[in-house]
Image (cartoon, helix red, strand yellow):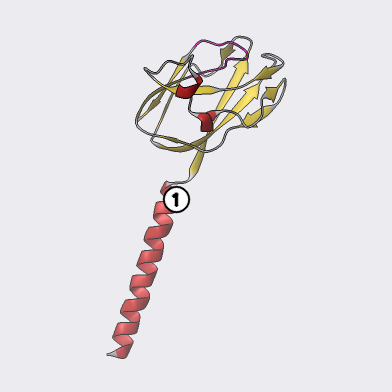
Amino acid sequence: MKRVISILVITLAFTLNSNAQDKMMNKAVKTISLEQTKGEFVQKALTVSEGTYVFEVSNNHAAKEVGLVLVKKGDDASKPENHIKTAYVIAVAKDGETQKTNATKLAKGEYIYFCPLNPTPQYTLTVK
């Protein structure tokens, strides 16, 4: 009887550990790469699944410095209080450099992204 209980306990512990690992894998941080050239992003629209992302922003001779602003669609993008601050690059990307943002959790919906330093149009990021 003790052996059966021990096996059940070990099986339960293994199952719980596997479930925890599965949940962690689903919460893995993914990367969205964006490239800026003069006056525009190369990526004009993006569709991703719900999750946590780091944005990598490359400055391909766009300007001395480039950055990224991400805003929920419908919010006034000209107001910094509407910007998703975790999606700001940690340091501006100088000519020829790539910089990253902090991890940003994206819920289902639509967002807009643009660069205020190398003024670009506003592009759509759809999260499904």
The image quadrant of residue 67 is top right
* Nearest to the observer: residue 60 or residue 71: 71
In the displayed structure, 8 sits above or below 48; it is below
Query: To which residue does mark 1 refer?
Result: 25
Residue for point 51% across, 21% down: 80
Query: Magenta region's main secondary structure?
Result: loop
Q: Residues within 10 Å of mark 1 (few under 14, many from 20)?
A: few
Position of 65 with respect to 120 (left or right) is right
Q: Amino acid at mark 1?
A: Met
Q: Which span is picked out in magenta?
A: 113-121
Q: Quadrant of the C terminus?
A: top left
Q: Residue furthest left?
A: 1
**Would residue 2 be counted in the magenta stretch?**
no
Q: Residue at x 66, y 25 (%)?
A: 92
Residue toward you, 53 or 80: 80
In magenta stretch: residue 115: yes
Quadrant of the rendered image containing residue 65: top right
Q: Can you say whether 15 is above or below 2 in the image?
A: above
Numbered disc 1: secondary structure: helix
